[in-house]
Amino acid sequence: MTQDEQRADSPPARRPRILVAGLGNDLMTDDGVGVHLARAARGRLPKNVRVVEVGTAVLDAYHLFEKADLVLALDAMQAGGKAGSVYRFRPFDVAERTATASMHDFSFVEVLRLLRKTPRDVVVIGVEPAVLDYGLDLSPSVQAGLPLALAEIERTISAWQRAC
């Protein structure tokens, strides 16, 4: 059998399952930036990319993370930069708290550690918050950072799709 015949007999490669997860509390101003980004990204990403507003129910999204090949998490991140700054990192590259008070307190990294099947790659796009108080709207400085975060989301998804 020739190499071309072998390729014709083999099933077509499956596209990777890409999950974009908006994290955070959208009732707490800038803490909800991940949810706001997920809403904004939904119409801008390829149709085969699943975009979900997880919010604070990270443990409830366990099954989504476990089924995904590639996960892009969107969240607020206090890293000491200027409000609205955009960060791109892998979740195990940052320090993580050690105590969990309740099932609602499971962090994204803690849920990743529980998975039986881990994604091939996990990237977090974080945005430096300015205001963490009750409110539905993002602060002006975080709102101004959304275009940069959306561009980073699109770059990450494009890179993943080119690599697969």
Image (cartoon, grey):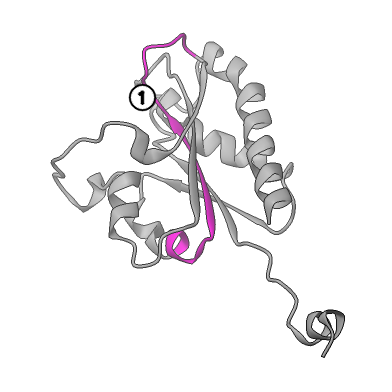
* 65 falls in the magenta region: yes
Quadrant position of residue 1: bottom right
Residue 121 position, x and y percent, is 50, 50
* Residue shown at the point (74%, 56%) measured from the top left: 47
160 to 80, vertically: above or below: below
- Name the residue: 40% across, 37% down: 24
Identify the amino acid type marked 1: Tyr
Residue in the foreground of this view, choosing between 17 and 60: 17
Compared with 53, 8 (above or below) is: below
Answer above or below: position of 1 versus 54. below
Observer-nearest of 104 and 27: 104
Residue 161 in the image: state x and y as whole percent: 70, 51
Quadrant location of residue 14? bottom right
Quadrant the C terminus occupies: bottom right
Q: Is residue 98 left or right of residue 59?
A: left
Which residue is at a point 39% across and 36% down the rendered structure image? Answer: 25
Q: Can residue 12 be found in the magenta stretch?
A: no
Q: Read off the residue under disc 1.
A: 134
Residue furthest bottom in the image: 1
Query: Range of the magenta residues?
Result: 64-83
